[in-house]
Image (cartoon, grey):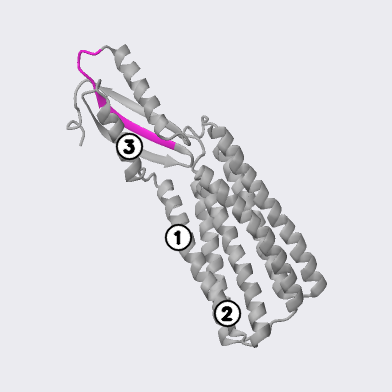
Amino acid sequence: MLKLRMRIEKKATIVSTSVAAILVIIKMTFGILSGSIAVLASAIDSFLDLLISAFNYFALHNAEKPADDKFNFGRSKLEPLAAVIEGTIISVSALFILYQALSNIVHTTELKHINESVVVMVISIILTAFLVLFLNYIAKKTDNMVIKADALHYKTDLYSNVAVLLALFLVNITGIAIIDSLLGIAIAAYMMISSYPIIKDGILMLLDAALSHEDIMKIRALLDEEREINDYHYLQTRQSGSDIFISVHIVFNVSISLFDAHVISDRIELAIENLFPDNSVKSIIHMDPYDDSDDID
């Protein structure tokens, strides 16, 4: 299941990279032919999108490599690292858009090559809209933060393109140039607000934060229902990309055989794995003959 899901995620990054490449070619062609600086700037933005999507493919490809002598726990932290990087890029882009919008309010500039810009924006909106729908589908199916970040990235591009097209239309109709800047400020605010949870979740995963309260309660409920153990303690959890790591001390009756304790522990490990069918769960169960929770400070 996990290998299939990872292939789907990598396929999503290949699709997003391909779409970005197509947009770069289209925008660069129109920009050179029309001489529109706005269209050329948009081509550069799409080129950055291409680089980010290509990096996401690299991160996912290497994150699924098995553990080895150098990386004993695998490379799954490349996923939250990629999400933090992409979220940061989105935030920086938002700040740049905000700066440009405020500068245009102070120093109003006349929009040029409107017809060429409209054609490029329409093409960009159509292609990006299909890409966002596809990435959102993969994100919901896999719950992968790299794909979520990529979906957010292209969603902000989509909204920006729609805002640009709307601004071109309204400015052409009304002659009020400030409309373009006001829409830019709104898009910048949306980008910064939307990137915050992506960056936050990525940083928490890099810092080995525990699983959510709901997930921990599911594990505790499973252990509470286990009748062949006396107690448990030192339950610790963390997630790294698609991998979930769980360790717990389980208290057995002092007279139980080592073989029987291992059989019960293996069954508990399997039950915990079944709680997270879409993840690779790595459990470490420490078998105690008595409650030693007071022995460790």
> Looking at the picture, which amino acid does disc 3 mark?
Lys
Say what secondary structure mark 3 lies in. helix
Which mark, by number, is residue 68? none
Label 3: few (<14), some (14–19) or many (≥20) C-alpha neighbours in 10 Å: few
On screen, residue 75 above or below 269? below
Between residues 63 and 144, which one lies in front from this camera angle? 144
> Looking at the picture, which amino acid does disc 2 mark?
Ser
Give the dominant element type of the magenta stretch: helix, strand or loop. strand
On screen, residue 135 above or below 216? below
Question: Which residue is disc 3 drawn over?
Answer: 218
Real-space Cα separation, disc 2 to disc 3, in angstroms: 49 Å
Between residues 40 and 217, which one lies in front from this camera angle? 217
Residue drawn at 48 percent across, 61 percent down: 194
Q: Is residue 78 visible?
A: no
- Mark toward the viewer: 3 or 1: 3
Q: Can residue 71 be seen in this view?
A: yes
Question: Which residue is disc 2 drawn over?
Answer: 181
The quarter of the displayed image where residue 282 is located? top left
Between residues 60 and 71, which one lies in front from this camera angle? 60
**Magenta residues, start to end:** 244-256
Looking at this rendering, what residue extends furthest in the left direction?
A: 294
Q: Sequence order check: which comes first, mark 3 or mark 1? A: 1
> Looking at the picture, which amino acid does disc 1 mark?
Tyr
Question: Which residue is disc 1 drawn over?
Answer: 196
Label 1: few (<14), some (14–19) or many (≥20) C-alpha neighbours in 10 Å: some
Q: Where is residue 115 in the image (x, y as percent from the top left)?
A: 76, 76
Looking at this rendering, what residue extends furthest in the front direction?
A: 173
